[in-house]
Amino acid sequence: MSEMIEQIKEWIEEREAKIKGNEGHIVSLQDENEQWKAEITGLGLALKLFRESEPQPGNGTPALIGKYANMGLTDAILDVVNTAGKLPGMTVREIVDALIAEGYKNKSKDLYNSVYPIAMGLVIQKRLAEGEKDGKRTFVRKVPINPIILALKQDAAARK
């Protein structure tokens, strides 16, 4: 019986030692997490400084270089499609991805559900055109009609 008692005591001591070892690991991991948090704070400040130093939209910045951070959604959609929306056009997902990649600050829960009706409104206003890619609706930049072609079309319509 005393052997069993000694064995149980030994098991208890082993487990207590493991607990102490684990507690040491926990403290070490907590310290490491604090270091990571400090680095994240520093990186966040650096990111903020870089964003503040970026050129603002509309002052000659090249298309698709972080220029949508302070732009309204309608103007940003129009700019994305006018910049990159050549045939067969851009799907709503592609427009959303371009907006986010270029700094658009998403205020809605689902940007996709905001972009689609605005893009359709721009089509209705004839500021964008529609296209199709892989069976999906796309949005295409509105290409100005060559005045010569326009005159020929008007002339042909007048002759009918």
Image (tube, rainbow, N blue to C red):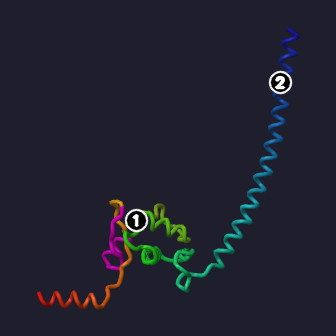
Point 24% across, 91% down: residue: 151
Indicate whether 157 appears above or below 105.
below
Query: Where does the magenta region start and end?
Result: 118-133
Q: CA distance from mark 1 to mark 2?
A: 65 Å
- Quarter residue 3 falls in: top right
In the picture of the structure, the residue carrying the numbered disc 2 is: 12
Mark 2 or mark 1, which is nearer the start of the sequence? 2
Give neighbour class at mark 1: few <14, some 14-19, many 20+ (Cα, 10 Å): many
Disc number placed over residue 147 in the picture, else none: none
Amino acid carrying mark 1 in the image? Thr
Amino acid carrying mark 2 in the image? Ile
**Residue 84 within the segment the image draws in magenta:** no
Q: In the image, 80: left or right of 66?
A: left
- State the image coordinates of residue 133 (x, y, percent, origin top left): 36, 63
- State the image coordinates of residue 70 (x, y, percent, origin top left): 54, 77
Point 53% across, 75% down: residue: 64
Point 67% across, 70% down: residue: 47
- State the image coordinates of residue 66 (x, y, percent, origin top left): 57, 74
Q: Please state, as top left, top right, bottom left or bottom right, where the C terminus lies in the image.
A: bottom left
Farthest residue, direction top: 1
**Residue 131 within the segment the image draws in magenta:** yes
In the image shown, does 5 or 139 lie closer to the viewer? 139
Which SS class for mark 2?
Answer: helix
Marks 1 and 2: which is nearer the front? Answer: 1
- Quarter residue 65 falls in: bottom right
Farthest residue, direction left: 160
In the picture of the structure, the residue carrying the numbered disc 1 is: 91
- Quarter residue 140 falls in: bottom left
Give neighbour class at mark 2: few <14, some 14-19, many 20+ (Cα, 10 Å): few
Which SS class for mark 1?
Answer: loop
- State the image coordinates of residue 23 (x, y, percent, origin top left): 81, 39
